[in-house]
Amino acid sequence: MTPYRNLAGNSGVSAFEIRDDSIEVRFANGVTYLYDYGTPGRAHVEQMKRHARAGRGLSSYISQERPPYAAKSDH
């Protein structure tokens, strides 16, 4: 996974992995969520990719938009 740059300095996101049709987001508590084109859909996934690459706004986007996730992992 790629470490999240956290340019605002207060994100709960620690890392992410971008794939063609999905993004995995790992939070500071170690929980990883998968978001893909099936759930929550392409528009959300592409917006999360933009925030992840920019290093800013990913955690805020997830907490405000509350996109459903396709899978959750606790490791």
Image: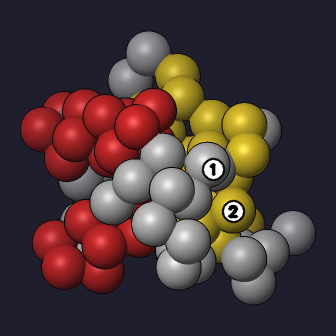
Contact, mark 2 vs mark 1 (Cβ under 8 Å): yes
- Residue at image location 31% in from the left, 34% down from the top: 50
Up-down relation of residue 4 to residue 73 (above or below): above
- Residue at image location 63% in from the left, 50% down from the top: 4
- Which x, y percent locates residue 65? 16, 72
Quarter of image, res 21? top left
- Residue at image location 24% in from the left, 53% down from the top: 40
Image quadrant occupied by the C terminus: bottom right
What's the residue type where badge 2 is placed? Ser
Q: Earlier in the sequence, mark 2 or mark 1?
A: 1
Reading the image, the residue beneath label 2 is 14
In the picture, measured across the screen, residue 40 lies left or right of residue 3, that is left
What's the residue type where badge 1 is placed? Tyr
Neighbour class for label 1 at 10 Å: few (<14), some, many (≥20)?
many
- Which x, y percent locates residue 59? 41, 69
Per the image, label 1 sits on a secondary structure element best described as: loop
Reading the image, the residue beneath label 1 is 4
Quarter of image, res 68? bottom left
As drawn, the residue found furthest toward the top would be 20
Per the image, label 2 sits on a secondary structure element best described as: strand
